Amino acid sequence: MDNKPSDDINELNRIVWRTATSGRLERFAKLLNDPEAQKHFDETFVTKLSTKIEHLFRLIFLLGGIYAILMLSLFAAQDPNKSEFQILGYSFKNLGYYKEFLLFAAALLSPISSGISAYHRYLSELRKIALKKLYPNPQILEFVTHIYSDGYSDPLLKDSQSEHIKPHGFTVFLVAAFGIVFLAVLIAFLASSFILQIAVIYDVANNPSSSPFINRFIVGFSLSAIALSWLIALLQLPLPEVDLGGYIKLSKLRKSNQQMYQETMKRLSAVSARRERAWSIGSAVAIFVFTYSAIGIVLPSQVQQNLWPLLFKSLPGIALVVIVATSVVSRIKSTIYRSYFRKYPEGSDPEFKSFSRATKFISLTRLALTFIASIAYSLAVNE
């Protein structure tokens, strides 16, 4: 009998990476196969949808331009030797007196623009599915698509689908160089936008132009709004989903082959422990960085300090929260699981409701202790 459980492990640990809109897009694709629904999603639907997509794109472009002007003007206003800010020959005197108001307006635009951008991407995916249904031939679809959307990369990349033609090495080198440079520019743009946001918020907190209460409120609101906009962007990325069907296979394996079941459980436990350890460390560092940055900016005793000393003082705090999120929580986890298995021997909790509650309690305990350790250390070093 074959006792190698590697295939079963891969199935039991299967994780599907899907975006938040994947389910709706799949339902829309199935709906297009219904003859009754096809009359509602004809070429007229695609045309109206394209008009809405173009309107949203213009709105995103306008909001992005306004946001960039506000943030760049605030960044330029950090120089105390300049009495006015100039752009395209137009000057804005005494811009520094309105820093809180400009930062508030920019922070308000950030999540709004991110939300509209997410909706724009969702409608664009709907249009792609509708076009595939209208034009099932890929060759026709490739060229008809240009009526409804723009493909700016088509004139740059050579079409090498001909039967007797393959790309030359020099062409491949140019395309690879283009991709690398484009990726570098994109990463630099994202990094610079993040650094610009932090630098502007830090300057407003360090050099307030209004009352302390208004200044702290604006700084806190700006941090929350910008964090919300980044979270909206992250939620659009493919996120993991767990295939719960693996538990059914594990239950069948337990009844049919006890030896393979025990070996599978051992390997699953090892994989789960590595994944949980990586998640604990990553989440602990992220929570500490956010908490330490927020407290370091908001506290009036720290906004007068330079940025580098604050960063160096954060290193012991990172080590502290990692220890809390791993070693301390591991001991709490062992205690809770021992209590669970004493209270519920094998088979006495068939629906795993109590086990699920215990697991959720451990996760909440990890987050709570990480937040408490981050806040306590931040307040202690920022006194």
Image: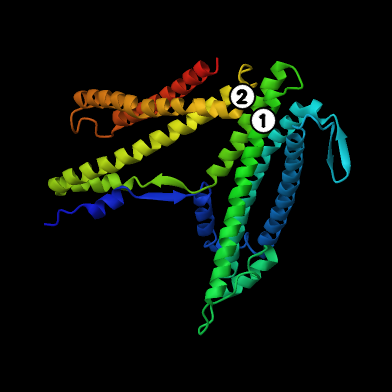
Residue 193 in view, yes or no: yes
At 23% from the left and 23% from the top, the residue drawn is: 339
Q: Which residue is mark 2?
A: 297
Q: Quadrant of the C terminus?
A: top right
Q: Under tag 1, what secondary structure?
A: helix
Residue at horizontal 33 percent and vertical 31 percent from the top? 356
Left/right placement of residue 130 relative to residue 11 reads right
The structure residue drawn at horizontal position 72% and vertical position 45%, both measured from the top left corner, is: 64
- Is residue 138 shown left or right of residue 71? left
The disc, 1 or 2, on the residue closer to the chain's N-terminal end is 1
Give the residue type that dot 1 points to: Ile
Q: Please state, as top left, top right, bottom left or bottom right, where the N terminus lies in the image.
A: bottom left
Front residue (pair 137, 269)? 269
Find residue 118 and report its horizontal and vertical position in percent: 61, 46
Give the residue at the far left of this rendering. 1
Which residue is labeled 1 in the image?
201
Is 165 or 149 nearer to us in this picture?
A: 165
Q: Is residue 94 above or below residue 3?
A: above
Q: Position of residue 357 (x, y in %)?
A: 34, 28
Determine whether 78 is above or below 29 in the image.
above
- Dot 2 lies on which element? helix
Give the crowd class for mark 2: few <14, some 14-19, many >=20 residues within 10 Å: many
When asked about the image quadrant of residue 213, the answer is top right
Q: Are marks 1 and 2 in contact (CB under 8 Å)?
A: yes
Q: Amino acid at mark 2?
A: Ile
